[in-house]
Amino acid sequence: AQSVTQLGSHVSVSEGALVLLRCNYSSSVPPYLFWYVQYPNQGLQLLLKYTTGATLVKGINGFEAEFKKSETSFHLTKPSAHMSDAAEYFCAVGASGNQGGKLIFGQGTELSVKP
Amino acid sequence: GAVVSQHPSWVICKSGTSVKIECRSLDFQATTMFWYRQFPKQSLMLMATSNEGSKATYEQGVEKDKFLINHASLTLSTLTVTSAHPEDSSFYICSARGDREQFFGPGTRLTVL
């Protein structure tokens, strides 16, 4: 079975500050891990994903995440927050060998950016 | 990237009526599509997996007779909420399976009065 836990339902940062959104997963098989962003009343947009290989993954809009197997974590970071980063962020886990398959989502973290 | 559309983007209906939501992959063929529902300020919950030409696979706790899914072609899946009630009001999101990721539609806001 797989599960995802996002620590903190709401994170607030100042513009220009570091963004850190936490995600821990549980998986009985090697996981595929994803971060998605959702703006109000819209669908999900893929920020980045980890499948195999390099554990530090770079995504769009300056975001990156590091897969740490020993910590079962896949935290999302961005060095400098921008006002346009304010949105809901979801971490998700999928089964290895099935990149387009079933996803289990975390509870979501709402990111607020203060001017 | 690949584009997935949903229609309608929002719908208001009376209790007891049925509502059909369409999910289309516009520039690729998708043998598998997924349907999610999302309550306000909550995560996406997978409702069912829709496979072209075969019956959908429903997640535990999802009523298959209430949420009818049809995947008649490689670019279209439909979700019909039958005899809708106010508790069915939610944001419904579909996704289409590509080679390496799922591509999400923009969602459909359903309000049942």
Image (spheres, rainbow, N blue to C red):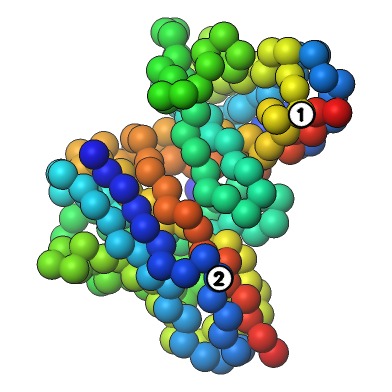
State the image coordinates of residue A85 (x, y, percent, origin top left). 59, 73
Q: In this view, does A13 lie to the left or right of A42?
A: left
| Element carrying mark 1 | helix
* Residue beneath disc 2: A10
| Residue A83, quarter of picture | bottom right
* Element at label 2: strand
* Amino acid at dot 2: His
Residue placed at 21% from the left, 43% from the top? A96
Q: Distance between the residues labelled 2 and 1?
A: 28 Å
Q: Which mark is residue B86?
A: 1
Q: Where is residue A35 in the image (x, y as percent from the top left)?
A: 42, 59
Name the one closer to the observer, A43 or B13: B13
Asked if disc 2 and disc 1 are in contact, CB closer than 8 Å, the reply is no
Q: Label 1 sits on what residue type? A: Pro
Vertical order, B48 against A61 (above or below): above
Given residues A26 and B30, the one toward you in this image is: A26
Residue at point 41% right, 24% down? Answer: B60
Q: Same chain for labels 2 and 1? Say yes or no.
A: no
Q: Mark 1, chain letter?
A: B
Q: Residues within 10 Å of mark 1 (few under 14, many from 20)?
A: some
Q: Can residue B87 be seen in this view?
A: yes
Classify the position of the N terminus of chain A by image quarter.
top left
**Subunit under mark 2:** A
